[in-house]
Amino acid sequence: MKLAQTVLLGLLTGGVYALLASGLTLVFGVMRIINVAQGALLILAALFTFEIWRRTGLDPLLAIVVTTPLMFGVGWLLYRGLLARVRAAPEAMTVLLTFALAIAIEGFMGLIWRNVFRSVTPSYFASSFHVGGLFLPKGLAAGCLTAVVVLGLLYLVLTRTWTGRAIRASAENLQGAQLVGVRVVDVAALTFAIGVATTGAGGSILSILQPVFPASHYVWISKLLGIIVLGGMGSLPGAVIGALLLGVAENVTSAYVSPRWSLVVFYVVIMVVLLVRPQGIAGSRLREDVAA
Amino acid sequence: MSRAGAVAAERAAGGSRVPAWVRPAAVTAGVLVLALGPLAIVDNLYIQTVAILTFLLVVSSSGWNIISGFAGYVSLGQSAFIGVGAYTVGILSKHLEVSPFLLAPLGGVAAAVLAAILGLVAMRARGHAFVIITIAFLFLMQTLALNLRSITGGSAGITLPLPTWSRDLGELPFYYAMLALAVLSVALAAWVRRSKLGAGLLAIREDEGKAAAIGIRTPAYKLIGFVVSAVLIGIAGGIDGYFLTFIDPRGMFDILISVQIVLAALLGGRGTVWGPVLGAFLLQPLSEVVNNYFGTQLGARLLVFGGLLALVVVIMPSGIIPTVRNAVRRWRERGSTVPFIEQPVRLATVPAAPAANGQAEAPAEPGARAAPDEPAEPVGTAPPGESAARAPASAVRVSEADREPEPERVPILEIRGLSKRFGGLTALDGCTFSVREGTITGLIGPNGSGKTTVFNLVSGTIPGAGGEVRFSSRRIDQLRSWERPALGIGRTFQITRLFKQLTVLENVVAPLRHFSLRHLASGGTSGAEAARARELLDLVGLGSFGDRTAGTLSFGQQKLVELAQVLMLEPRLILLDEPAGGVNPSLIQHLADLIRQLNREGISFLVVEHNMPLVLELCDPVVVLAAGRTIAQGPPEAIQRDPEVLGAYLGGDGSATERLPRGPAELQEDAPAGPRGPGNPKGDAPVGRER
Amino acid sequence: MGGGVLQLQGVVAGYGGGDVLQGVDLRVDLGSITCIVGPNGAGKSTVLRAVSGLLPPRKGTITLDGRAIGGLDPAGVLEHGVVQVPQHGGLFPSLSVRENVLMGAWVLRRDRSLVRRRYQRVVETLPVLGEWADRRAGNLSGGQRRLVEFARSLMVEPTVVLLDEPSLGLDPASLRQVYDLVKLLNEQGVTILLVEQNVRVGLGAATWAVVMESGRVRLAGPPREVLDNPEIADLYLGGTISRTGRV
């Protein structure tokens, strides 16, 4: 029973993780940028949700309607203002830049919300469903469901709209996209903005699952990197698979070994996968081959 | 006090026309100030503390610079070595009654071991993958320190013994220890920069594939570089731990320290020796100012450092010192470009390799084309006396043991059944041909016939698939790309791959025929190799270009530099990939003469070219590839008349039902009238009409 | 649609390593099928890239019917009705054939009914697209992909189609289909500017022939005369054109 419970919790958590990781992998797939600031943006969105809930009492899962466009705007500005300027720079410098952003955002959050744990506690927060002997925490279940819905919307946008097609086309074949008239810089900004927008929804969900404070973004970016590396950087289905697998692995480690070691799973996954099979489960090749 | 040192450093690094004594004098002055200064402020503990932290930053940043500045492998995990050093000292001092100062070197050892392990595995990743691995590594270390409570004390940390000297000395022992380490680390960085190791690391940063192609054993270099970058940081970490007296996982493995290390080097000038020093002296005081102004609000500090790093990356990614240097250089060089064409072009004899190499000065005798006593043919306006004064010698250091008994018979290069696919595309399909020693063999064929793929497989730039490549009867297709130059194979690239940010001389000195640890330590651009490099530059006509940055040369000039690079390896066979492509026609003749002369001296050539007049004039025999296989081999006149070759170039759709004229023989049968001659496609047959 | 001209004058362009085009003067009559041939390195494909906006010229002008299009980005060139079908890799492998073709109308995407109508028309011209519509483009063979790329270019009802080595890697049957389509389009008034390394096939379909060598136009004229020129073969195998201009 304990195993089933652990796995169930892991799957639900994995569902949420899938949404959180989707933006990161999307941006990488199209633009080959690893946005290390995704964790910080996630916490930022969670804190926005907290503010909204504190002032208006609006349910955090409904606040997604506000936080998603808000984060979209933040992403757009970040790209246009900063990232667009380093398009020609070597990859490592772009990672440094997003890292710098992460730290700056952490500082900003610290100044405004101070280094105190914040959490959103709507009425259903602490209770659980009882299904067949297993406990389903209501917050987690609602969060997972919301995540799935948002992921579904993202999927629809990518496959049914012109914008989505342009994004997927640019990811595969930049020159081909240019030749049909797609303006590359616009697509880049749009993709990045969408990637950051997912943290809007993700952050709102996160706010009811765990207490957050500014420096917790390191934990989150580690988890997200582990997920997309395992699933294959650039692959959305890969992110889902990786999220589910690691959600379960994390929970199992936490329950059977110790919660303190659960984060190590992610670090180990990052290092092992990048070295043994850099394209992960479902992704395209990440690194160039060192000469023969 | 600290500012004076920084200013002196900047001045010392800024100009190149400054008299030679200025830089060492400025450095000595700076060090003296730093060494004697504290005696005046022995009571001011605060300034001593700031200075100690500044020196620590200098050590860390200089170390970081070696792997991330010189080699280009950006690491965000360098502060882990500080933690490792501190914990080593902390743990050992719990069990040993020795002064932590004496334990600090062990911290360096621990850091070196860890760096070696990390380096062995992480060096296979590049670009952002490497950065992420170093971040994961840092976090992993922190988690281990937190969780392995029995060893590290967990979050409770370790308390080190208190200092044993009298209060009157204040923090001075730490001050001098850190200062010594700082001086040492800068000296180390300077020494690495000047050595062959540094030259190799820089080459790896500029173009790792090319570095491998000229014989640099990249994995070894990267590993050594990584270990060297970590050692002093480990020692400094040990001293830092003693200084702080209390160490804990959060403080010791703080990623913010890593950010400061990176920021200091970036700000001052990544890849320069003094950049990290300048950056450290700017950043640490800034950090103090921020601390004092904003108090304990952690957020402010983060915002400032994050913002500063972002700004530096976006606006001034190369840092202060290189930016200033470039501005000065551009101002000095304004309006003074010397076009290559105006330079007198002198062809001298290819110089002998330095005798220090231990090989006999035997001239090679590669068969019929050898003429070791033939005087050099000067081309251009060179005074004949100058070139004749140089004793003709061989570029090829072929000792008795290496030479083939009958060079005419055994091919120097054999390609047998070579196949290669890229995804769904078949580039080579059982390609077979050989190159006889002493020849200039041409390799031609239409677009997509596989010529460049053959080159890439021979030089090892891409991994092979099916078939064999033999060099002097020895199979080489399984060797790594950096192992092949040692055998005597050199290769140029269709689009030149020079190390653009290095000077021309540094580029030519970079190739390595043999690898040895002792050799790594020797000077990069001085000594026997540099002299030979200069001679080779003279040979190709670029003698006065040695100090120019390679990226500023014209395309044709770059090709000549690449050729000089190849010659440094004393090759027996050179693969030339489109040597005339994109080159000014006036230079093409010069190139052809150079190739011919080198060939007379014993070097065999395999030349891919599209410039048909050049091929027909220069090469004999000529091999023709089409659709991944050899369709013809022979002297140029025969190739020119071969109907199959003609067909391959001019096309036909291969359909059996099409009545297309296939070649001259057929044409001459069909042609009712009209001018005769090779390749006359006249005829009444419907040409290319699809039905 | 006679009368107008696509003209290049004194175009110099390159990739930074060296100029591939060294002063190209080229005149393409609208309504023609003009084929550029020449040895490797002559700059044939580079001419197309300069026209379609992938490689802005350093010097010289490119005009279409008097309107300057040199230096515009590909989206801008598209607005003038000039489409390029690249040599390889123009498709999006993980998108379906239908989606690939639809992407050809990216610049028209706001008008949904127009896009639908155009798609219908394209499928009528090339019925086999209907069969393949839901197949993943990456699963098609080389010849099939070339046809899809071609079809995609028709979505904007272009004035000029730039074809880069359409025969490369094609089997005879696909080759025939491609050139049938070329002729069909031309009959409907579309100007075709193509680059071919298969001289006989290319000049066989063309109404005007252009020979390039070393970044310049060496010879231009009716295809039969150019083909008959004994120096053509020499050009490919080491000779040079003795006379420039019209044969």
Image (spheres, coloured by chain):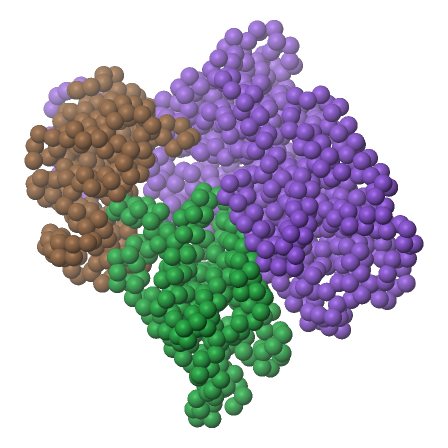
Dividing the picture into quadrants, the one containing residue A69 is bottom left
Depth order, front residue of A44/A7:
A44
User: Could one spot residue B279 in this view of the protein?
Assistant: yes
The residue at 58%/15% (across/down) is B348
Residue A110, percent from left and from top: 56, 62
Residue C106 pos. (x, y %): 23, 51
Residue positioned 34% across, 51% down in the render: A187
Chain letter for green, please: A
- The colour applied to the residues of chain C in this rendering is brown
What's the colour of chain B in the image? purple
Judge by depth and name the residue closer to the eye, B351 or C45.
Answer: C45
Q: Residue at x 50, y 43 (%)?
A: B314
Viewer can see residue B220:
no
Looking at the image, is B516 positioned above or below residue A55? above
Q: How many numbered circles does the render carry?
A: 0
- Residue C163 or C143: which is nearer the viewer? C163
Question: Which quarter of the picture shows residue C76?
Answer: top left
**Vertical arrangement, residue B165 with respect to residue B413, above or below:** below
Asked whether, in this view, residue B690 is left or right of residue B32, the answer is: left
Residue B23, by quadrant, is top right
> Position of C143 compared to A111: left or right?
left
Residue reaching furthest to the right: B166
Specify the quadrant that holds the N terminus of chain C: top left
Apparent side of residue B53 relative to residue B671 in the rendered image (left or right): right
Q: Quadrant of the C terminus of chain C?
A: top left
Q: Position of residue B160 (x, y in %)?
A: 82, 63
| Furthest residue in direction bottom, as rendered | A133
Q: Is residue C52 above or below residue B327?
A: below
Residue in the foreground of this view, choosing between A115 and A198: A115
Residue positioned 68% across, 22% down in the render = B18
